[in-house]
Image: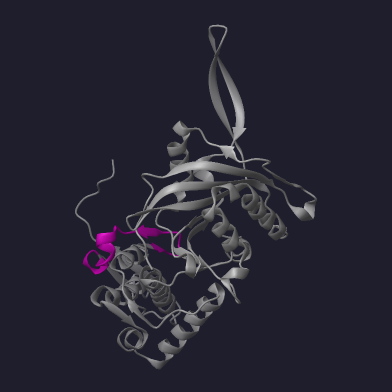
Amino acid sequence: MSAKIRFTSATAVGLVLAKVGHPQRDEPLQTSKEVFKISEHDQEPLAAIFLKPFKNLTAHRFSHHSSLDQHEMNACAAAIFAADDGLLEKGCDIAKRLYAKSNHPNIKSGDLCISLIKDIDIDGTLTQGLCILKSESVVPFLSISTRDGDLQLHTEQGINPEKIDKGCLILNHLAAKGYYVLTFDRSGSDSRFWVRDFLGVVPITDSPFLTNKYANMAVAFMEKEKKQQPSTAADAPPWDSSNAARDAITYFEEKENFSLHEFEDEVLKTPEAKAKFAAHRSQIEEEQGHRLEDNFEISKKDVTKAKQKIRSMMKLDTGVEIRLKPALAAKPDTILEHGYDEGKKMKFIKIFFNEDLAD
């Protein structure tokens, strides 16, 4: 269900605004009394600002244990897409839902913007979108104006579009399966609140999602396993954990389809490693609230992304840090040598070079 999305022709046509306080601190909820109509010349630039954070995000869909008909956010989106005049009522309902879910002491109050977006290109078809943005802080900005023939400087408080804290874009696509939903939470700490409690979405487990999850999981697991091996004077070099991670990534690069059984036999190999990886995978499944499939088509673009995350820096306990460029990180043995000094009872790394390029 992976989709190709373009925002170049999108326009924002209406806004519902809200100030969402914290119910446990007796802070009120204030919502728009009417839809804010966006002037025609502002529709394209506002859409560009609103939609900028939603590039290259994992796709989600609304999910309910019983039926999508019982899902409040899904019902609000469906009503707005069915008739533009439902934006005010259902937009306020969305704000009320967010307020009702904001009981945890770590959740911050903030400004909510709910915008109806038209002409989003998804797989070549123009469709509607519902953009929900929450900003939890305001920043000062400067404004220069003319008065009595002279220039004056004013300071005001406002929302920085580059630092929107939380966001959701509901696309009128795959409605029967819970819509195509993109979401982000810059804080990370409250993602469970935003993604599960408020939005009620789960990831769409398509090829890019599964490739990304398994490839990153494999990299993290292999590096962790190497680090946890008993320390001895004859240890493998510090960069060996990265080499192990690259071995795992090689599987994804060489295969067209992922098979968990095949991955276990070719990469993990030992019963102990297979059991540990299974436990590692189960923990991730429990944290995310859904099971990962055992077989799927591999997305090569997401393999490249995972490969770039393999660590290229060694942090040593003596305070020394060695950073390698990506091309060199794949073959560190060409300029690095690892050993053990019996006199100092310490490991060492020897670096070979031709000249110092620092100014």
Q: How is the image coloured?
A: one colour
Tell me: 304 left or right of 129: left
Q: Is residue 274 depicted above or below 248 in this figure?
A: below
List x then y, in percent, for residue 268: 36, 85
In the image, farthest residue toward the left: 354
Nearest the eye: 339 or 145: 145
Query: What residue span does the magenta drawing correspond to?
Result: 314-335
Q: Quadrant of residue 322?
A: bottom left
Q: Quadrant of residue 215?
A: bottom left
Tell me: 21 left or right of 156: right
Membership of 59 in magenta stretch: no
Nearest the eye: 111 or 276: 111
List x then y, in percent, for residue 217: 42, 74
Looking at the rendered structure, the number of numbered marks drawn on it comes to: 0
Q: For the C terminus, give its image quadrant.
A: top left
List x then y, in percent, for residue 3: 36, 62
Q: Quadrant of residue 187?
A: bottom right
Report if residue 172 is visible in the image. yes
Nearest the eye: 351 or 57: 57
Tell me: 327 left or right of 71: left
Q: Is residue 160 depicted above or below 194 in this figure?
A: above
Q: Is residue 182 depicted above or below 240 in this figure?
A: above
Membership of 331 in magenta stretch: yes
Q: Which residue sits at x=46%, y=50%?
A: 53
Report if residue 135 is visible in the image. no
List x then y, in percent, for residue 85: 58, 47
In the image, farthest residue toward the bottom: 271
Q: Which residue sits at x=51%, y=82%?
A: 282
Nearest the eye: 141 or 320: 141
